[in-house]
Amino acid sequence: MARRRALLVYPAMAAVLLFTLAPFAWVAVSSVLPEVAILTVPPQWFRYGIVLDNYRYIFTGAVPQSYQVGGQLRKMISEEVRQVPRAALNSGIVAFAVLLANWLLGAPAAYAYARLRFPGRTATFYFITLSRLIPTVALAVPYFLIVQRLGLLDRHLALIAVHTVLTLPFTILILTLYFRTIPPAIEESAQLDGATRSIILRRITIPLALPSLVGTGLFAFMLSYSEFLFALLVTTTAYSRTLPVTLASLASNPDVSWALLSAGATLAVLPVGLLLWPIWRFMVRGLIGGALG
């Protein structure tokens, strides 16, 4: 029975991994190849070796030698791909600010819902958590009008505020459930020693809930880093545009080089991959712990 299960499970896992990772592998390989190697049928990927000219063009503007020819390939050089580093910086700034906002606002709110009794506690908790069931598209126009009226178009602050509103309900839900798993006796002992609620939150509750706190923070970071719709509506210039919007404009350009587009996509994925890889287990454990609390 176990052998039959293995014969079914392992091929299925291999198929899922292949389906999931193959596109990323193709993009990563294409980013270090000249355009001609990608367009040749059948592919001749390793005939030209590893070429870093695509990345050099993104950061310095030096046109790769493989594009220094007449005909179709030369026109595929797009200046938009050089906006990727700036867009990645914008996405990182916004996402990191959203992460901090979720910690600063979500932790006290979750603690209040988990430990305090106040009028409207249940109603407001369900209102906040169920608000994420509203389709994002339905909120696009109202949020845009609010941002426009406040004069915050094309500013990072507008994206930070919108992304915080979108991610905060999840943070409050997970942290509230996690805080409820912490024995109240620990906090009661601290209260007998004269500790206030704020001290208990900072010195006892938050350290005990650190896995869930890190998990919700990283989840908010990822959602903000990859959010497209509001970034498209709120940002209007290349100076403040985020990475998803920049990559979308590249993908819709019929003249862009596949190699340059792959290099830009690789640069987009790399920061998140480096951030999550060493603490992936920590993040998953925190989210699951809060969800099961």
Image (tube, grey):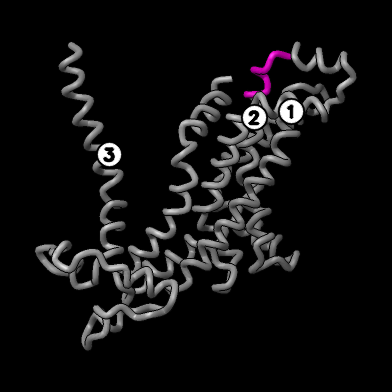
The three-letter amino acid code for the residue at tag 2 is Leu
User: Is 49 displayed left or right of 125 in the figure?
Assistant: left
Which residue is disc 2 drawn over? Answer: 175
Locate residue 202, reporting x and y percent. 76, 31
Q: Which mark is residue 17?
A: 3
Q: Residue at x 62, y 33 (%)?
A: 213
Tell me the kind of residue under disc 3.
Leu
Q: CA distance from mark 3 to mark 1?
A: 39 Å
Asked where in the image residue 192 lies, by quadrant, the reply is: top right
- The one nearer the camera, 282 or 227, is 282
Confirm whether the magenta stretch covers residue 143: no
* Left or right of 84 on screen, residue 40: left
Whether residues under marks 1 and 2 lie with C-beta atoms below 8 angstroms apart, the answer is: yes
Look at mark 1 in the image and give the residue it sits on.
111
Residue 199 image offset from top left, x and y in percent: 82, 28
Q: Earlier in the sequence, mark 3 or mark 1?
A: 3
Which of pointers 1 and 2 lies earlier in the amino acid sequence? 1
Q: Secondary structure at mark 2?
A: helix
Name above or below for residue 100 compared with residue 151: above
> Seen in the image, is 152 located left or right of residue 34?
right
- Does residue 151 appear left or right of residue 46 in this picture? right
The magenta segment: 178-184
Q: Quadrant of residue 201?
A: top right
183 in magenta? yes
